[in-house]
Amino acid sequence: MKNKGFTLIEMIVVMTIIGILAALISAATFRAIEDAKESKAAAAISAVEAALAMYESDVAGYPLQAAGDNAFKSHLQNDDGAVGWNGPYMNFIDEDLDKPAAIGGTKYMDPWGNAYQYKCPGNNGVYDIWSCGNDGVDDSGGGDDINAWD
């Protein structure tokens, strides 16, 4: 009676093909996830720009801030005493903050867990706003940073 099984060579070939397919699929999946994070960061920056435009329209200026963690958040969400303030101009949900607002969340975080950066006056416009990107290194809007002026 003849055995009706797979030979060792056949098993190795099948396992190699499965391994190659898994590597291709996982690489494409990780790239798609990274692209989605970049798109989310760009959309968040656009939302902040829209809120800053409303703020500027009401108070005739932008929140001044040296380069650093997103100080714009408090100006857009809470009355900062500026004449004409008519906000809040943007609401921030807990999942996008460094910690829940109820326990003092103050920083608006990008998809990689880093605070968005804001500078006014800016080097590339009236103000600069950017995410440090995947590497978390602040390249002042260059490198892999996602910014409002590109």
Image: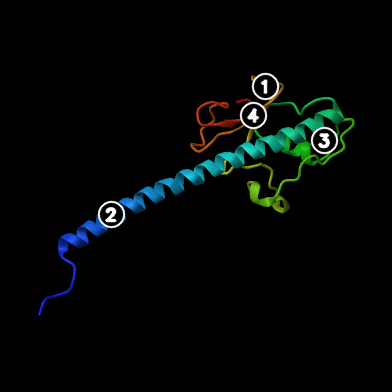
The type of residue carrying mark 1 is Gly
Q: Which residue is mark 2?
A: 17
71 relative to 92, above or below: above
The quarter holding residue 82 reads top right
For marks 3 and 1, give the CA distance: 21 Å
Image-based side of 87 in relation to 34, left or right: right
- Position of residue 126 relative to residue 25, above or below, is above
Q: CA distance from mark 4 to mark 1?
A: 11 Å
C-beta proximity under 8 Å, tags 2 and 3: no
Residue 67 image position (x, y, % from top left): 64, 27
Please give the label number shown on residue 122: 1
Q: Pointer 3: what residue? A: 80
On screen, residue 98 above or below 65:
below
Tell me the residue that label 4 is attached to.
148
Q: Residue at image x 65%, y 39%?
A: 43
The one of 40 and 88 positioned closer to us in this rendering: 40
Mark 3 vs 4: CB contact within 8 A: no
Residue 9 lies, in percent from the top left, at: 16, 60
Q: Position of residue 32 (x, y in %)?
A: 49, 45
Query: Residue at 74% across / 26% down in the picture?
Result: 64
- Marks 3 and 1 in Cβ contact (< 8 Å): no
Q: Amino acid at mark 4?
A: Ala
Is residue 134 left or right of 62 when viewed as pictured?
A: left
Inter-mark Cα distance, 3 to 4: 24 Å
Residue occupying image coordinates x 84% and y 29%: 57
Name which residue type carries label 2.
Ile
